[in-house]
Amino acid sequence: MNKNQSVSTENQMRKKEASEWMRYAKEDYNLVQHLYRGDYYPKPLAIICYHCEQATEKATTLVDKDGRERKINKPVLEWEIMSLVSQGFTDIILTVSYRSDQIMSYFGDGSRLGAKITYFVEDTPLGNAGALFKLRDQLDSPFLLLNADAVFDVDFQRMVEFHRSHDALVTLFTHPNSHPYDSGLIVADDSGAVLHWLTKEDARPQWYKNRVNAGLHVIDPAVLDMTGIDPTTIGEAGEDGKPRRVDMDRQILKPLCGQGVMYCYDSPEYCKDMGTPDRYEAVCHDFES
C-alpha cells in the first residue's frame, strides 16, 4: 500500500468513525428530548378524593373557545375525569363516601370514558387523606392527588414535569383566590420551595401574598411513610371514641415546610374551589359568562 492509499484509507476510517459518533449523538439527543417531554415516563396514577355534593351536580351550560354556548348534561366529576384522560392519565382511583353507589353505578370501570377507574369506599370517614394510607400498597411512584371540589382546566403533564425537574416529594398547584382567609396560605422562597404553611387557624401577618393551595398535587408516596402514622389505626376509635382521621394539610404537608422537598407550582390556569354553595354558583357563572 502506497502513501496515498494509506492516507485515503485513514480518511475513510475517520469519516466512518465520525458518522458513527454523529449517529450515537443524535440518538442520545433524541432520548434526552423524549425524557424531557415525559414520553419515556409512564403517566402517574390519578387519585380523585370526592368529599362534596357539588361534584355530582350537573352543569347545564358551557361556553366554548369561540364564545358559543352549548348545552351539556354531565356531572362535574365526569368533566374532571375527561380532562385527565385527554392528557393520558387513564389510571384513576376515586375515593368515595357520599353517594358512592350512585357514582360507581354511573362511572363503572371507566371504559366508557377511556379510563380505568377503581374505587376506595370510605364506609367510615377517614379524613381527607386517610384513604391514601389504606391505598399505600398500590402507590409505588408519584401520583396526582386531586380534590373533586376543584374545577380545573390544567396542563397536568407540565405540572408533573415541573415536579420531576425540581426533584420534589410534593408539588402544590398554587394561585391566588377570592377566599385566602379560609385557605392554606403558602409562603415560599424564590425557587418556589415552601417555607411555611399557614392554616386558617394560624396567626397571619398583617400583609401577606395571596398564594394558596388549590387542592391539586403531585405526591411521592414516600411522604406517607415519613409521617409515622400507623395505617391500621386510621378509622379505628380513638380515645375520644371517634374514628381516627388524617388531615392532608396539617399532618402530611405542613411538616414538610422548610425541608426543600415541597414546591409551589404557581399557575394562572383555571382552577376554582366549588366546595360551598356560593362558590359552586360562582363556577356556574364562569361557565355561563
Image (cartoon, grey):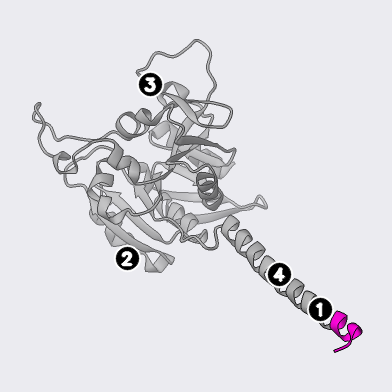
Mark 4–mark 1 distance (CA, rounded to whole Å)? 16 Å
Residue type marked 4: Trp
State the extent of the magenta-drawn residues as a range. 1-8
**Nearest to N terminus: mark 2 or mark 1:** 1
In this figure, which residue is indicated by the disc labeled 1?
10
Q: SS at mark 4?
A: helix
Q: CA distance from mark 1 to mark 3?
A: 75 Å
Residue at image mark 3? 200
- Mark nearest the camera among 1 and 3 is 1
Name the amino acid, label 1: Glu
Q: Earlier in the sequence, mark 4 or mark 1?
A: 1
Q: Is residue 49 above or below residue 263?
A: below
Q: Which of the two marks, 2 or 4, is nearer to us in this view?
A: 4
Of the residues under marks 1 and 3, which one precedes in the sequence?
1
Q: Position of residue 159 (x, y in %)?
A: 53, 46
Q: Are marks 4 and 3 in contact (CB under 8 Å)?
A: no
